[in-house]
Amino acid sequence: MTTEPREIGGPLTYKDLEHTPDDGNRYEVIDGALFVTPFSTYPHQEAATQLLTILNAHVRGKGLGKVFASGLIVVLDTPTGVGPDIVYISSERMRDMREDGYHGVPDLLVEVLSSKPQLDRFVKASKYASAGVAHYWIVDPKGKTLTALRLQGGRYRVVVEAGRDDTFEPELFPGLAIDLSDLWVL
């Protein structure tokens, strides 16, 4: 954590995340605006943990790249530093990894809905699309759904909307079949 003086006012940048408190909240800066999300719920954590475990086993087993949990700062541009619930970065894109986070466009970002679903569905979706993130998944543990979006023509299009007990076979990971019932709290 740096303590050097900084100018107050004006839009924030991802560097301002260095000055946020370590209080369990998630702090993100999107296009210069600060967003704070409180502690995750049990259903949120269950879905994120199970999906991370499944993706990580597949990606590592095939040598495709790396999968990261919440806590990795993804710097999409100077005024935007986010902390998605799950980040997949292919081996080819790992060159953009730095000590302070990932500076570039990941192959996949996953957000698990919790206390601020509109942030994930609209604000982040818009930002991720404008940054060029090709694949974005939104997991809704309350509704027990997973929506897979793919960037086409600068906008996200739904490619799969899967529910409670469906098997999801992501186009990004050929040969992977995810039993969605494994993600939900009973």
Image (cartoon, rainbow, N blue to C red):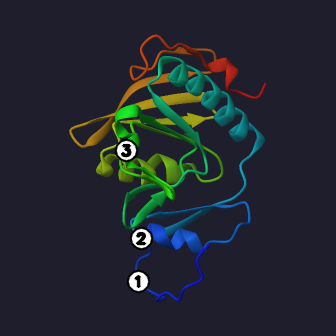
Dot 1 alpha-carbon crowd within 10 angstroms: few under 14, some 14 to 19, many 20 or more:
few
Could you say which disc has been placed on residue 95 in the image? 3
Residue 113 lies in quadrant? top right
Extreme residue toward the top, this view = 175
Figure quadrant of the C terminus: top right
In the rendering, at what x and y percent does residue 30 appear?
Answer: 44, 62
Say which quadrant the N terminus sits in: bottom right
Comparing labels 2 and 3, the label whose residue is closer to the camera: 3
User: Residue 137, how many percent across, how many down?
Assistant: 47, 35
Q: Residue at x 67, y 26 (%)?
A: 183
Report crowding for label 2: few under 14, some 14 to 19, many 20 or more residues within 10 A (C-alpha): some
User: Is the residue 164 above or below the residue 116 in the image?
Assistant: above
Q: Amino acid at mark 1?
A: Gly
> Mark 2 or 1 closer to N-term?
1
Q: Which residue is mark 1?
A: 10
Instruction: Say which residue label 2 marks.
Output: 32
Q: Which residue does the image show at 46% across and 89% down from the upper left? A: 7
Q: Position of residue 96 (x, y in %)?
A: 38, 48
Q: Secondary structure at mark 2?
A: loop
- Give, as a three-letter code, the residue at label 3: Arg
Mark 2 residue type: Gly
Label 3 or label 1, whichever comes before in sequence order:
1
Nearer-N-terminus badge (2/3): 2
Residue 142 appears in the rendering = no
